[in-house]
Amino acid sequence: MANGTENIAEYSNPGQVTGDKLSFKSLTDKISGITERKTPPVWFVAFGAAFSLLLVLLGSIGYLVWEGVGIWGLNNPVGWGWAIINFVWWVGIGHAGTLISAILFLLRQRWRTSINRFAEAMTLFAIMCALIFPGIHVGRIWVAYWMAPIPNQMSMWPNFRSPLLWDVFAVSTYFTASLLFWFTGLIPDLATFRDRAKKKLKKLVFGILSLGWRGGNRQWRHYELAYLILAGISTPLVLSVHSVVSTDFAVSILPGWHTTIFPPYFVAGAIFSGFAMVVTLTIIARKIYSLEHIITIDHLEKMNKIMLLTGMMVGYAYSIEFFIAWYSGNIYEQFVFLNRAFGNYAWAYWIMISCNVLVPQIFWVKRWRRAVPVMFVASILINVGMWFERFVIVVTSLSRDFLPANWDYYKPTFWDISTFVGSFGLFFTLFLLFIRFLPMISMTEVKAVLPQADPHSRTSGGLDE
Amino acid sequence: MSKKVKNNAQKYWQSLDQLADSPEYRKYLLQRYQEETDNSFSRRNFLSLMGASLALAGLASCRRPVEKIIPYVSQPEEIIPGVPNYYATSMPFGNSAYGLIVECHEGRPTKIEGNPVHPSTMGSSDILIQASILGLYDPDRSRSVKHNGSKKSYEDFVAFWIGLHEEFSKNRGEGLAVLSESFSSPTLARLKNDFAKKFPRAHWATYEPISDENIYKAIKQVTGEDLRPVYHYDKADVILSLDSDFLQTESENISAARGFAEKRNVTENGNAMNRLYVVESAYSVTGSVADHRMRLSSNRIYEFLYVLVDKLNIYPSFTAHKSLSDQFDMEWISAVVDDLKKAKGRCIVIAGRNQSQEVHELVFAINFLLGNIGNTVTLKEIQDTSLPNRHDIARLMTNLKNGNVKTLVIIGGNPAYNVPSEHEFKYWMDRLEHSVHFSEYYDETSTMTEWHVPRAHYLESWGDVRAADGTLGVIQPMIEPLFGGKSNVEFYNLISSGDERIGYDITRETWIKFLGTRNFEDKWRLILHDGLLENSFLPNRNPRLKRPYDSMIKEVPIDDGLAFTAEFNPKLTFHLELTFHPSKLYDGRYANNGWLMELPDPITKLAWDNAALISPATARELELKNGDIIEISHQNKKLDIPIWISPGQADYSISLPLGYGREFPGRVCKGIGFDTYKLMDSSNGFMLTGASIIRTGGRHDFANTQDHNSMEGRPVVREADLEEFKRNPSFAKEMVEHPPLKSIFPDHDYSRGYQWGMVIDLNVCIGCGACTIACQSENNIPIVGKEQVSRGREMHWIRNDRYYVGNSDDPQIVHQPVACQQCENAPCEQVCPVAATTHDKEGLNTMNYNRCIGTRYCSNNCPYKVRRFNFFNYVKDMPEVIRMAQNPDVTVRSRGVMEKCTFCIQRLTRAKRNAKAEGRTVKDGEVLTACQQACPANAIHFGNIIDPESNVSKLKTDERNHDLLGELNVRPRNSYLAKIRNPNPLLKGYKSDDV
């Protein structure tokens, strides 16, 4: 469809799915079939690998609880290291799902339907990974619950002036809203699974999960409304959660953290990395399960465009930080930014700039924007760059702050690395379970954007069956 | 308690068991008194024993003699749990002693302070004094008498010695030798005399690896008398130090620091201050506060002195050789000469103890001719001491080799570790018939002697001392010997008399001489209360110079003096100078002290290890980096040691700190550092020339607490010359411009009650580190070990930042102690999610350890980075006996908790409680923080800042007063008085730009 008739095509095929054979039934068969067929061996291989990494995570956390956060590379000026970097990074990744589901839904970007389920699941799992880190990075893990406002006999109450507390609320709210939104969207598809199930247990489980969905007109009406309301609720959360995460830094007085640009800059960065992760995962899944006709190159291209946009937004933020540092006349601020670019962590800074600012520029070229191998590499590099962005913010600012006598170099230990690598184990374990047992593409929504669903469509002269 | 006393006291019974003399009681006695042989001295044991002894105290009033310990501050009728008692005592140290006040909790000493009325401490202390409390509880101290390595009882040793004693009594000591440490004690002197009378043919040698021997010898040489110089820095306007670190590692450093600080206090002295010139090879604490510092190899000090003497024109007939004068910056020397001449009778020239006798003779003559003797330098007769003598040990070794010594008794010291290796001490020790070592540790020497007898810590002993000015002081025990050691006086007495007596009786016997028999008990009680005999200092002596001045000037050593001026050899072989310096472990006797080990060196900021210090230029020439291991060889001695580049070090001079690399397997010192004694030479003392080095290719990792040495042009330590300061007294405040400071949060009410605040005078701070150790002792700060320090996790609540200023080869140094600044608008408080750190109404930023969950956000948001996090459970493996050194008023922090300075809140609480009980308010100066109390320079001031009469509130109005990072609107309660240097206006361009 990459020709001059694109506009017409888009009008006539808002879901951007391709393939003449795609019908309601074939779509249902295709998506349901993935979970109904015998588990392919490649899934077991992947699951084995992911689960091993999950065990690495559990082992690392176990040792952490046993010994203390001293097993990480933290030191006196650098009180936060990989744990907080990983937290912010995973939360960032968890942005694309809800953005695609909620904001693009409200904006009537109907091409989202092929990827939204996928992206939402990714969001949930990314937030789960993220939530591990603030929980385990505290010194006394067994009392981390004191951050929650739980009435108790000791009259202890959290300090609502602390951004860490805002974090607790922001991320948990976001997680709850995303979970509900995801589940609501799943209901009609779960009912399809229930109807197709042949085994008793499966019937029972999907029967319970589909909440008695029968596909009646009134149910559809309520469902659509609920979905719309949830989209409305989720939309501000997409923007708020990373804004609040950014206040962890922005509210402090540390040069390099204490900047007002952080909320929008963090949100842009989060969307940037979230889309990159969706692209990475989508490319793999559509290849393995032959979903190229449902998740088409057009979908990928659209996401690449968003990455190009948000990549330039973070690039702008990087440059404006330098300008403000110079403009402020604050020697500490000026030093921090010069130190980022030319100091002892310059290597991290230039990795960040290369991956986040330079790499997305290739998407100006349409051929590359639509070339799967190019975007696969680029999307991975972007997430590497976004990880380093958090590294640069967290570590360089702390390691060289106001009094030069305090300066120290921060190096991760084996346990920093194993915990981070292990968090991928959790992510992929959940993700593999998801694609094995649940519809990874929203059948309901894709059907609604198939040309056949449009009574005015040229191809909807009649049901093609 | 000795056996004899027990026998005497047998008619008095202490318990029913004892009366019945039951087997259980005998067993108990055996366990209790014979030897604490295993390592299981638990706190439970200790507490039960303490409980038992308290219970017995009531019963035991019949016991004689009752050893009275009189409280210093208030006399308790009994020990009140939770209320500490304070007792006066003294810490013997070489040829001097420090008067102390020791805080005891329920019979357990926990904290040491200086005795305000003692001339050597004046209420302050230094790192060694502060850390010695930890030495008391060192679990690695020897716990039993040993004979050829196997455990014996003290009675066995006594029986052995009585046999030998009888034998030697017959032949008047033929074949008997004693090797002792030096001391300054009337009782020990008396016992030594008794020994000499009884065994006239015996040989008594006194050895100290680090001593003022050359100074004493020089004064003896020029005056004919054994005299000790006492310096009065509080009267000196100009000081020239030649390789003398008189503020830190030389004798009487505390009173020196105090006097120096008084003369440096521009506020009180009406904008006048002293001027310090330092000529030295290695950067010392004294050099770091100098107004002018010249780096010069130690062995060229002699030449420098020649040129100085020439310019001073005090020897009319003498002119330094022209080629010698050309070697030095004559402008610099003229400036010094000019200042010294202007300040006749008000100046001090002092040379370091590592300088030769000849240098000290000349220095004495200069002081004499400048009229300083009797004014800034007074001379005291040396009484009741055993002066160390390097030749003595050489004679002893000769006697050993000739077979003239059959039995050697080593009292204290550790000659196997610190006697120069050419004496082959270890080899000859094996050839003795009998050898005895009396020491606190079963150390390098003990392992090669036949007998080892454990020595009690000074806090466990009776004894007496003479301070540098002759003031008599008493050592009284704070606790019964934890590991069953014997005190010095008891052992000396046994050796000389062959008789066993308790230290209390031996000491009192001596004091009858000073106090007379009339009213002895009353006077004795007063001595115990005060810790010293008032006005017992010795009169000043005003000797004449015995030798004609001119004869002091020997041949000008042009040839050898200049020999080392570097022929560069690409094979990395040099003709280098080696200098040896006491480290923070002094001569190595404190090597097993974790507080000292972990204290960063004031100059290099290295914790744990020592290193060969070399200058940046030498390092560049030899292509050496920090941590490169080199092999130093001098004559036939070799040592592998890593280097550390020390800006300000003299080129081609290597400084080697002593006291590390012990073979003694203590849990702290094992495998730490490098034994620089291996290079020491018996003839030349503390400096050698002609050493060469080769890079071995090895690397060593150091634990350095300050990675960055420059202030990066930031207004951190604010400094000005005296002239600049006079022109613009508020220069420090003007160094920072900022917009109006406003907060979105409402202020706390700071207008009522006590509002605590602190002022640190950077002008007098010498950076010695006493505050750090005092804080560690007071606040139960854990030792974390080298690995943790190298990862930046040291726990010190007050640290000393050291910055280099100026030329990177020859910089100036500034020090800045930084503890929690107790911000009124504290950034840490706002970000804690669980409100574990909050403000109290007295302006303290308090920590609630129980509430802390360890997010470390407070530390990230602290601009001073003074918060310390317990990354691990650092006290988990602390031996039970060391736990006894902990202050019961301060919580021991667990893993995962943030901690920091709270202005010694436990002391504030105690003072407020006392004041409330007496119906008054806390007086200014009534409560001192631990760092303030320890500071020898009185740089730290603390008190109620809203009381207009308080010292601290007056200092807060000083023109030099400024906040550190005040522009952040954190409003610190702690402020600093800017540093002022007083360079000679004749010397231009000394101050250079920040690197």
Image (cartoon, grey):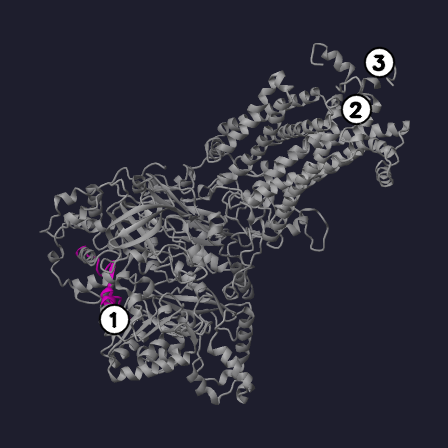
Q: Quadrant of residue B978?
A: top left
Q: In whole angstroms, how far apart are the C-alphas of marks 1 and 2? A: 102 Å
Helix, strand or loop under label 2: helix
Identity, as a three-letter code, of the amino acid under mark 1: Leu
Cβ atoms under marks 1 and 3 closer than 8 Å: no
Q: Nearer the viewer, residue B573 or B865?
A: B573
Cα separation, mark 1 vs mark 3, equals 118 Å
In the image, residue B898 sits, relative to residue B505, either above or below, namely above
Chain bearing mark 1: B
Q: Earlier in the sequence, mark 2 or mark 3?
A: 2
From the top left corner, tell me how far across and down residue A304 is, in percent: 65, 22
Residue shown at the point (15%, 50%) measured from the top left = B557
| Residue B404 visible at all | yes
Residue closest to the eye, B168 or B944: B168
Residue A317 shows in the view: no
Q: Secondary structure at mark 1?
A: helix
Position in image of residue B594 (x %, y %): 45, 58
The verdict on residue B391 being magenta is yes
Q: What mark, if any, has residue A456 been given in the picture?
A: 3
Are dots 1 and 3 on a single chain? no
Mark 2 vs mark 3: tell me if same chain.
Answer: yes
Marks 2 and 3, Cα distance to the nearest angstrom?
17 Å
The image shows residue A34 at horizontal and vertical percentages of: 78, 31
- What is the secondary structure assignment of the residue under circle 3? loop
Tell me which segment is drawn in magenta: B369-394
Residue denoted by label 1: B400
The chain containing the residue under callout 3 comes to: A
Q: Position of B28 compared to B642: left or right? A: right
Q: Quadrant of the N terminus of chain B?
A: bottom left
Q: Residues within 10 Å of mark 3 (few under 14, many from 20)?
A: few
